[in-house]
Image (tube, rainbow, N blue to C red):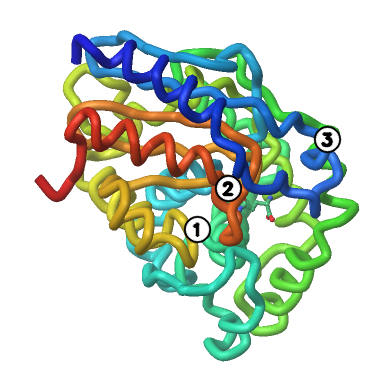
Amino acid sequence: MDNLQGILTEIVQEMGAREARGTVANYIPELAAVDPTKFGIAVALPDGRVLSSGDTDDVFSIQSISKVFTLAIALGRLGDQLWARVGREPSGQAFNSILQLEHEQGRPRNPFINAGAIAVTDAILAGHVPKVVLGEILHFVRTAAEDDDIHINKSVARSETETGHRNFALAHFMRAHGRLFNSPELTLGTYFHQCAIEMTCEQLARAGRFLTNAPGVPRMVSPDRVRRINAIMMTCGHYDASGDFAYRVGLPGKSGVGGGILCVVPGKASIAVWSPGLNAQGNSQLGTEAIEMLARQMGWSVFA
Ligand code: GLN
């Protein structure tokens, strides 16, 4: 652990020199404006230390990483009944694919593809107004990070509300199958706002500590549930590149189109990396390469 800071500094230098940085998500206009040369990485350790390097003061849009937090909230509220609404198998399809949903009668494969995450948000919305649910999601994230200075970027949420036609298609399709209980407008309004939560790498690394099950970290859900969330992160957290991420990195992770990745080293560390350029599967290109380098140098893997 002594050389961790040195490794992080080296990763920032190495990634800064790489030319192929992927492409910034442009289907959400507000995200298209983010500087593609940004890069930050942070590691939160169970003893309370957070080591970091690069652009660690910038906040970025966590986007689909929010799906980990809403899954934890939904499992807490519904328990195993959640699985009646969404599966837990890798999809092998793009994060915003419509194809599989039609084949499978509107039941999304897993909680991390868009359709599944929309179903999860719909489930936690039951009987509440969006404002209250968004307050609960923010409260969860702030408690996990032990930091109240975490907010939703309203411009990003608005930008996606205006352009999120594919997500509206998914929501309407599920509604047509009786699998969405609130109106698509209400559920997606909540979903777009949860995706628009912004954090720095350090805040995200801290917010992910509960997923390590390490002693002394905030206990947000039971250890048993943490294991299960990690299993879904490993199998589904990078969409149709989940197998590749497991092969290259060997750790549970969740990506977002804002260019962030949250990665868990069970019992040892929570890692957050941010580089806005995405690869063909919509995962941070340099973020993936950076975590691969970090995991290899630290000898971190769930596969011993
Ligand atoms: N808000 C984005 C969307 O629904 C999240 C996708 C992602 O981060 N992969 O398209």
User: Which residue, given by chain and number where applicable, does mark 3 sit on?
Assistant: 33
Q: Give the mark toward the camera: 3 or 2.
A: 3
Q: Looking at this rendering, what residue extends furthest in the bottom direction?
A: 103
The number of discs equals: 3
- Looking at the picture, does residue 98 appear above or below residue 216? below
Q: Residue at x 33, y 11 (%)?
A: 5
Whether pointer 3 and pointer 1 mark residues with C-beta atoms closer than 8 Å, the reply is no
For label 1, the crowd category at 10 Å Cα-Cα, with few meaning under 14, some 14 to 19 and many 20 or more, is: many
The reply to whether residue 144 is visible in this rendering is no
| Measured Cα–Cα span from mark 3 to mark 1 | 25 Å
For the residue marked with disc 2, what is the amino acid?
Answer: Ser
Looking at the picture, how far across and down is residue 98, in whole percent? 66, 77
Identify which residue, 85 or 199, lies in the foreground: 199
Image quarter (top left, top right, bottom left or bottom right) of the N terminus: top left
| Measured Cα–Cα span from mark 2 to mark 1 | 7 Å
Disc 2 C-beta below 8 A from ligand 1: yes
Earlier along the polypeptide chain: callout 3 or callout 1? 3
Earlier along the polypeptide chain: callout 3 or callout 2? 3
Whether pointer 2 and pointer 1 mark residues with C-beta atoms closer than 8 Å, the reply is yes
The reply to whether residue 112 is visible in this rendering is yes
For the residue marked with disc 1, what is the amino acid?
Answer: Phe
Looking at the picture, how far across and down is residue 214, in whole percent? 19, 27
- Looking at the picture, does residue 281 appear above or below residue 53? below
For the residue marked with disc 3, what is the amino acid?
Answer: Ala
Which label is found at residue 112? 1
Identify which residue, 71 or 287, lies in the foreground: 287
Q: In this view, does 171 lie to the left or right of 87?
A: right
User: Which residue, given by chain and number where applicable, does mark 2 sit on?
Assistant: 64
* Label 3 residue SS: loop
* Label 2 residue SS: helix
